[in-house]
């Protein structure tokens, strides 16, 4: 990873379902003193550094930044404080994840920034259609 991405901190994922792993990643980063954390999917060829930067800056006013995918999930989640409720009992890998996350945020009085709608790569056909975006 260091050869590919440079000298950064890399940590193994914690055990559990996707929600537990995401929540653990936020808790770990926040406990290390990071003030804002953004997790992104690795299957979003159209994602730009500007969109990631926007998710960080949106946390000036919002508690949560989400980047929705066209299939009903999200490719990006950014927080400045731990909110484990956002990752418990969620419909992972379904077309209702994004909407359920928005509802959970609303139920917990969290201000939300929504980023650009992007496509992720789930199938070979997605890769064939989206891979030209890589240059």
Image: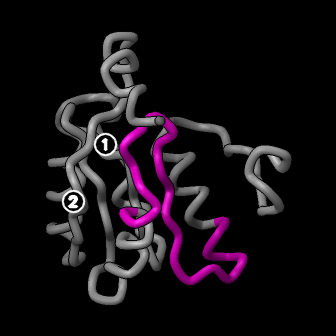
Residue 134: horizontal and vertical position, in percent? 47, 36
Task: Label 1, secondary structure: give it.
Answer: loop
Q: Is residue 59 above or below residue 64?
A: below
> Is 49 contained in the magenta span?
yes
| Colour basis | one colour
Residue 29 occupies quadrant: bottom right
Q: In the image, what residue occupies the spot 45% across and 34% down? A: 43
Residue 57: horizontal and vertical position, in percent? 38, 81
Q: Residues within 10 Å of mark 2 (few under 14, many from 20)?
A: some
Who comes first in sequence, dot 1 or dot 2?
A: 1
Instruction: Say which residue label 2 marks.
Output: 104
Q: In the image, what residue occupies the spot 24% across and 49% down? A: 68
Q: Residues within 10 Å of mark 1 (few under 14, many from 20)?
A: some
- Going by the image, does 93 lie left or right of 32? left
Q: Is 59 in front, or is 94? A: 59
> Is 9 contained in the magenta span?
no
Q: Is 73 in front, or is 85? A: 73
Task: Label 2, secondary structure: give it.
Answer: helix
Q: Residue furthest front?
A: 135
Q: In the image, what residue occupies the spot 21% across and 59% down? A: 104
- Going by the image, does 16 lie left or right of 7? left
Instruction: Say which residue label 1 marks.
Output: 90
Residue 19: horizontal and vertical position, in percent? 46, 45
The total of numbered circles placed on residues is: 2
Q: Residue furthest top?
A: 124
Q: In the rendered view of the protein, which quadrant contains the N terminus? A: top right
Q: Is residue 67 above or below residue 64?
A: above
Residue 115 occupies quadrant: bottom left
Q: Are marks 1 and 2 in contact (CB under 8 Å)?
A: yes
Magenta segment boundaries in residue numbering = 28-51
Q: In the image, what residue occupies the spot 53% across and 70% down? A: 37
Q: Is 59 in front, or is 103? A: 59
């Amino acid at each position: 990873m260091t050869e590919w991405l440079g000298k950064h901190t890399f940590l193994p994922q914690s055990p559990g379902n996707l929600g537990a792993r995401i929540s653990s990643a936020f808790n770990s980063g926040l406990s290390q003193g990071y003030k804002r954390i953004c997790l992104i999917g690795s299957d979003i060829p159209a994602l730009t550094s500007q969109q990631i930067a926007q998710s960080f800056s949106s946390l000036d006013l919002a508690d949560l930044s989400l980047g929705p995918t066209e299939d009903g999930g999200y490719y990006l989640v950014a927080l400045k404080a731990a909110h484990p409720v956002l990752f418990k009992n969620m419909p992972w890998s379904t077309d209702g994840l994004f909407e359920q996350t928005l509802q959970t945020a609303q139920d917990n009085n969290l201000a939300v920034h929504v980023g650009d709608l992007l496509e992720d790569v789930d199938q070979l056909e997605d890769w064939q259609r989206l891979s030209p975006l890589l240059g």
